[in-house]
Amino acid sequence: MLDAASKNKLRIHINSEHRKNGLLEDEFTSTIFGPLAYMSAEDAWFILRNIAVYSGISSDLIQFTKPYSFAVNFWPKQRKEARKISFQVEPDLVLSFIFSDGSKCSFLLEMKYGDHARLTPDCELIRQWSTRPDPESTWYHIYIGRPISYGRRDLKKSAEILENCCSNNELTCCDKNPHKFPIPLNPIMTTTDWRRWLRALSWNHIHEIAGSMARTGKSDNIKRWGSGVSAFLEKHDFVPFVGFEWLSDDSFSLLDEKFVVNLFEMKDWLSFLSSEELIVLDQTQDNIFFM
């Protein structure tokens, strides 16, 4: 939370009506990821790599081995000019790692706290990707926060905006935004390329990753981070249950209608007790034995 305070993101004196869930979004971000700034490059990489792999980014990370330095930057401001219009982009977190062979790997993280948090404007993720500071680095874009179904819907919508609005001359998406944001920079990239590096996770996923780090972390700092984050998220009602994605369509089949049984329409569940085949063999004060 020290990072939130240093960047004027800490709102201690805000009224209780605005602070509905205790911590606000930026404080939440700082609390979870702030400790990484005090870790070694190798420990921070271990955590970020596990988050990326969990999100579905895996094969491309094999090329990176042991980092010798890294940088953590909360809410970096990037100002760009697009068609004589200036706009500012501020992702929640940028982490950049440098490896012994000179290669670079960086992460853009955008975080939302609360089920009703929204991308503002709708092209927020597009702006972040198109204004990333070091295009020569290998970049990954991870969107954390909302329930995973909503998060994936946000990613799909972002891709549709990039493909249908930002790639033509109309750029109508931001014009319709109630916040009146100026039009975004027209990114020189394809939707396919961007979506390859773009993933969504929920705080429930982060809880599960942190729990795993607490048990199997390769250093005491990683284990302490995992234990603390896991406890912190649990106290904010995030649990490691992440849905039924393991239940694929090919793992079950639907029964024909004639085989469907409605359990609530069963006539008499205890009818077997009246069967003549049940003969009382012995009856005592406490027990009745049937054959």
Image: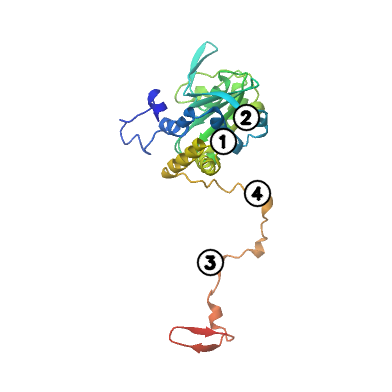
Q: Residue at x 60, y 31 (%)?
A: 198
Residue 43 shown left or right of residue 232 in the figure: right
User: On the image, which quarter does residue 167 sit in?
Assistant: top right
Amino acid at dot 2: Trp
Residue 289 shown left or right of residue 137 in the figure: left
Looking at the rendered structure, the secondary structure element under dot 3 is helix
Marks 4 and 2, how far apart in space?
A: 24 Å
Q: Which mark is residue 248?
A: 4
Q: Which mark is residue 197?
A: 2
Amino acid at dot 4: Ser
Q: Position of residue 196 (x, y in %)?
A: 65, 30
Q: Residue at x 67, y 53 (%)?
A: 251
Q: Which mark is residue 51?
A: 1
Q: Position of residue 107 (x, y in %)?
A: 56, 27
Q: Which of the two labelled residues, at mark 4 and mark 2, occupies the earlier sequence position? A: 2
Q: Which of the two labelled residues, at mark 4 and mark 1, occupies the earlier sequence position? A: 1
Q: Which mark is residue 264?
A: 3
Marks 2 and 1, how far apart in space?
A: 13 Å
Q: Which of the two labelled residues, at mark 2 and mark 3, occupies the earlier sequence position? A: 2
